Amino acid sequence: MRQALETVMASVPAHQSVFGLKAAVAECILKAAAHGQTSYDGLVASASDQIQAMISMLS
């Protein structure tokens, strides 16, 4: 899960990396895992699909 988090965060441009984003991405990954998503690619995809919404929410 940590590697999935780091992969998603590495894809976020520096100017979009807002306070609290890493925690929100981690929460998203944990929720996906709790719902049965166990593959690395699936966890990355789950978080990546929601990254813009998280940035908007935290901005």
Image (cartoon, rainbow, N blue to C red):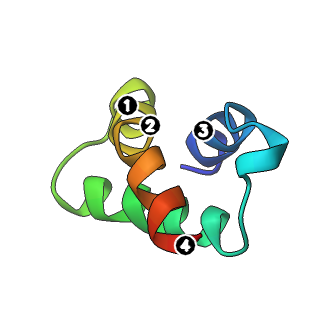
* Marks 4 and 2 in Cβ contact (< 8 Å): no
Q: Is 22 left or right of 40, judged from the image as shown?
A: right
Q: Quadrant of residue 55?
A: bottom right
Q: Which residue corresponds to the image point at 67% horizontal and 31% vertical from the top-left?
A: 11
Name which residue type carries label 4: Leu
Q: Quadrant of residue 13?
A: top right
Residue 48 bears which disc, if any? 2
Q: Is 16 left or right of 57, judged from the image as shown?
A: right
Name which residue type carries label 3: Val
Residue lying furthest right in this view? Answer: 14
Residue 8 bears which disc, if any? 3
Name which residue type carries label 2: Ser
Q: Secondary structure at mark 2?
A: helix
Mark 1: few/some/many CA within 10 Å (<14, 14-19, 20+): some
Residue 6 x %, y %: 70, 43
- In this rendering, the answer to whether 34 lies above or below 15 is below
Front position among marks 3 and 4: 4
Which of the two labelled residues, at mark 3 and mark 4, occupies the earlier sequence position? 3
Nearer to me, 44 or 38: 44
Q: Which residue corresponds to the image point at 46% horizontal and 46% vertical from the top-left?
A: 52
Residue highlighted by disc 4 = 58
Which of the two labelled residues, at mark 3 and mark 1, occupies the earlier sequence position? 3
CA separation, marks 4 and 1? Answer: 20 Å
